[in-house]
Image (spheres, grey):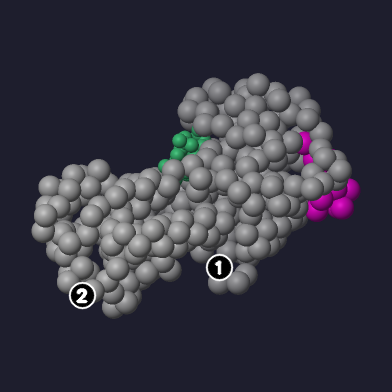
Amino acid sequence: MKKIAILTSGGDGSGLNACIRASVRQAIQRGAEVYGVRWGYRGLINGEIDPLDSRDVGGLMGKGGTFLGTARCPEFKDIKVRRTALRQLNQREIEGLIVVGGNGSLAGAAALHEMGFPVIGIPASIDNDVSGTDMSVGVDTTLGTILDAIDRIKDTASSHQRAFLIEVMGRNCGYLALASGVAGGAEAILIPEHEGPSLEQISQTVVDAYVRGKQHCIIVIAEGWKPGTQAVADYLLGQKEDLGFDVRVTVLGYVQRGGRPSIFDRLLATRMGAWAANQLLDGESGMMTALRGSKLELFPLSEAVKELRPLDLGLLTLSDVMD
Ligand code: ADP
Ligand code: F6P
């Protein structure tokens, strides 16, 4: 294999640029030509595919986002549309593709592999919901951002004796809420994977924290948790007189997706990016680079996209002990 391409797809996050840089440089070092596809699968369909050299990926290691651009492209689920994409690659004599993205993007990669085109995936999603890998690229940086926000909110919460509801991203996965809630010392963590406390019990947690003399009460809520942050806020505000703490809500939002990648993400992205290029050039396909313990392993894309990565709910118990 002498010509390969790389694209980033789905929700962005930190470390995508480091991945691209590593794949490009590793492939070039092995004598291959590398092409960058703009705007994920949309650019693949439209033929927005340009050669990349080592200098094109210079200075990217510390930059958030993705310089190739990314997109959601629902029409890629249609096999006819994917045929158009393969035609674009074949016309340029590109023989293999690296897809960097989350569950949806990796499902697209698996579909291309099933159509006979060589593909290697790199799991990259702030949600950490991709099965088969301990960590996806971008997760660690996002956790750092959330932790920084929780620490800041604790300062003001303590000064005013307030309870804060902090909503974090994660789509249908509670990983970000669970990990940041434990690391941030939250009094309660609400995630979709666990049926969790009723509104009455949440209110009781706030009262208990007040009665025990805490200066603040932090509740971290995953955006995918039902009935949702606003329902908790409405319920608590309805009990205002009895709570002790006043209540405020912070939805962290897209600040969680940007910023300079952490050391962990730079290393993970560099290792996975280079390894993906090597695997593709060695003739491997239909696989994803996966971090298992401290080692990189190949994991089948078809397995990775079957279900969301299971959470370690033992962390919730640990969080209760720390209360
Ligand atoms: P992420 O990759 O971050 O999980 P999405 O779920 O939005 O983000 O998926 C990104 C893109 O992957 C979609 O917009 C679509 O182009 C492609 N995709 C998602 N699911 C499939 C699928 N089942 N088959 C083919 N392509 C898919
Ligand atoms: O999958 C990453 C993610 O940031 C989720 O946590 C969030 O629900 C979603 O993407 C937001 O998507 P969009 O950028 O399309 O608004």
* Disc number placed over residue 234 in the picture, else none: none
Kindly indicate whether the residue at mark 1 contacts the one at mark 2 (C-beta within 8 angstroms).
no
Instruction: Locate the C terminus by quadrant.
Output: bottom left
Is 304 part of what is drawn in magenta? no
Query: What secondary structure is marked by label 2?
Result: loop
Earlier-in-chain disc, 2 versus 1: 2
Is residue 37 left or right of 150 when viewed as pictured?
right
Q: Which of marks 2 and 1 is in front?
A: 2
Q: Residues within 10 Å of mark 2 (few under 14, many from 20)?
A: few
Per the rendered image, the range of residues in magenta is: 25-35
Of residues 257 and 187, the one drawn nearer to the viewer in this rendering: 187
Residue at the image position 25 percent from the left and 52 percent from the top: 247
Asked whether mark 1 and ligand 1 are closer than 8 Å, the reply comes as no
Image position of 197 with respect to 182: above or below: above
Is 27 part of what is drawn in magenta? yes
For label 1, the residue is 292
Q: Residue most toward the front?
A: 159
Instruction: Check disc 2 and give the amino acid type.
Output: Arg
Residue at the image position 54 percent from the left and 22 percent from the top: 80
Residue 96 visible in image: yes
Q: How crowded is mark 1: few (under 14 residues within 10 Å), some or many (20 or more)?
A: some
* Disc number placed over residue 212 in the picture, else none: 2
Residue at the image position 64 percent from the left and 34 percent from the top: 69
Asked which quadrant contains residue 4, the reply is top right
Image position of 256 with respect to 318: above or below: above
Of residues 191 and 112, the one drawn nearer to the viewer in this rendering: 191
Question: Where does residue 136 sit, x and y in percent of width and height?
Answer: 55, 56
Residue at the image position 64 percent from the left and 52 percent from the top: 260
Asked which quadrant contains residue 311, the reply is bottom left
Question: Where does residue 73 sit, x and y in percent of width and height?
Answer: 52, 28
Of residues 270 and 132, the one drawn nearer to the viewer in this rendering: 270
Query: What secondary structure is marked by label 1?
Result: strand
